[in-house]
Image (cartoon, rainbow, N blue to C red):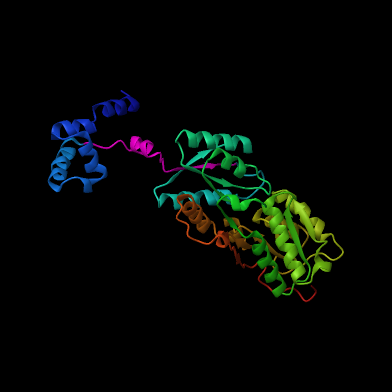
């Protein structure tokens, strides 16, 4: 007999609620009340029924109870593969943070895959309609992402980690202030004496990448460094090899940057490799700051902007459960600049 057959045999032989009621000489509803609404039952009856529950070894069918309440306590989450050539994905860290935050409230994740946005919406809807999940978490939103509107029309509950550029007031979301994070990196470099600060970003059109680029431009203009820096903006695919070539382009300029802010740690590592191949010492000849504060950043002593991922996971779960009492403006979480040797020194006098 295999394990599945044993489980089926045990299930068939397990006492039912009706068995408890029959042996205890009470109604089925009385047994149910003892289990789920004991305040409705007289103490003597509760004690009598509890004795037979223990004697028969009755275990309530938790799955049936969940279906009856239409509450699976499960949260749908799309998993995406790591980009080729990238060091790490912030979505992987968020997945772990979300799972941990959910565990503390007895909610757990149902992971699924989909080839595109339409397939994700369809899968999420089927999981919800079928009772497999109570709600869904969206992530990786683009500026005009169709998924929030589609799920709203289908009546599928969700919370987004990230937000669209418009209509974000129509659905619940938690996001990290990417503009402020890059702005803090530029402020740090200016305070170290740098005046030619380059930017290695994602290709235009990615919402998060565009916001980080906006943070760089806004901070550069705030410090009145536009004439020295606006030509030092290059874009790259999310890979070390692509970032190396983009950084070479910056270093070839007549007035190359003395510091670089990269949109991710992957791009920052590419910038570090390019600098070393150029004969520059990172931290002395060229300051570099990344974004996401991955384990790689710590290992390479790379300054980076740390996202509050654990807090984001907690806030998303709170929003899903309707227990988030924070004001709408506080849904945008502030990242933290972690300064390491790659940018800690003052700029060279030659800068």
In the rendering, at what x and y percent does residue 164 appear? 65, 50
Direction right: furthest residue: 254
Q: Nearer the viewer, residue 264 or 148?
A: 148
Q: Nearer the viewer, residue 204 or 96?
A: 204
State whether residue 208 is above or below residue 230: above
Direction bottom: furthest residue: 349
State whether residue 18 is above or below residue 318: above
Q: Quadrant of residue 5?
A: top left
Q: Nearer the viewer, residue 81 or 176?
A: 176
- The mark total stands at 0
In the rendering, at what x and y percent does residue 110 appear? 48, 40
In the rendering, at what x and y percent does residue 240 appear? 70, 51
Residue 68 can be seen in this image: yes
Image position of 24 (left or right of 238): left
In the rendering, at what x and y percent does residue 302 appear? 64, 62
State whether residue 279 is above or below residue 135: below
Which residues lie in the magenta part?
58-80
Q: Nearer the viewer, residue 228 or 137?
A: 137
Magenta stretch contains residue 68:
yes
The image quadrant where one finds the C terminus is bottom right
Residue at 52% over, 41% down: 156
Direction top: furthest residue: 1
The image quadrant where one finds the N terminus is top left
Image position of 89 (left or right of 54): right
Residue 163 can be seen in this image: no
Residue at 70% over, 75% down: 191
């Amino acid at each position: 007999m295999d394990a599945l057959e044993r489980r089926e045999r045990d299930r068939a032989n397990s006492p039912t609620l009706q068995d408890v009621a029959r042996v205890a000489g009470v109604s089925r509803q009385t047994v149910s009340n003892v289990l789920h609404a004991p305040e409705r039952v007289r103490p003597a009856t509760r004690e009598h029924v509890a004795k037979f529950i223990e004697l028969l070894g009755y275990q309530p069918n938790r799955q049936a109870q969940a279906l009856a309440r239409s509450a699976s306590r499960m949260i749908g989450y799309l998993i995406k593969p790591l980009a080729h050539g990238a060091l790490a994905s912030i979505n992987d860290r968020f997945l772990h943070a979300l799972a941990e935050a959910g565990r503390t409230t007895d909610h757990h994740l149902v992971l699924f895959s989909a080839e595109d946005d339409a397939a994700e919406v369809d899968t999420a809807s089927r999981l919800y309609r079928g009772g497999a999940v109570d709600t869904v978490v969206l992530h990786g939103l683009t500026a005009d992402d169709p998924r929030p509107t589609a799920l709203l029309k289908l009546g599928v509950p969700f919370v987004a980690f990230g937000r669209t550029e418009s209509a974000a007031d129509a659905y619940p979301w938690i996001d990290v202030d990417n503009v402020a994070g890059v702005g803090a990196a530029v402020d740090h470099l200016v305070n170290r004496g740098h005046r030619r600060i380059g930017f290695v970003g994602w290709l235009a059109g990615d919402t998060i990448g565009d916001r980080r680029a906006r943070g760089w431009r806004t901070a550069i203009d705030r410090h009145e460094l536009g004439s020295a820096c606006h030509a030092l903006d290059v874009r790259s695919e999310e890979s070390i090899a692509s970032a190396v070539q983009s950084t070479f382009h910056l270093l070839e300029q007549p007035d190359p940057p003395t510091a670089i802010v990269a949109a991710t740690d992957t791009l920052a590592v590419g910038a570090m490799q390019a600098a070393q191949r150029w004969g520059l010492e990172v931290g002395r000849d060229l300051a570099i700051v990344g974004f996401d504060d991955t384990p790689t950043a710590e290992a390479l002593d790379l300054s980076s902007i740390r996202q509050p991922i654990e807090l984001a996971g907690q806030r998303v779960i709170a929003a899903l459960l309707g227990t988030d009492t924070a004001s709408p403006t506080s849904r945008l979480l502030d990242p933290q600049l972690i300064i390491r040797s790659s940018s800690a020194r003052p700029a060279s006098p030659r800068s």
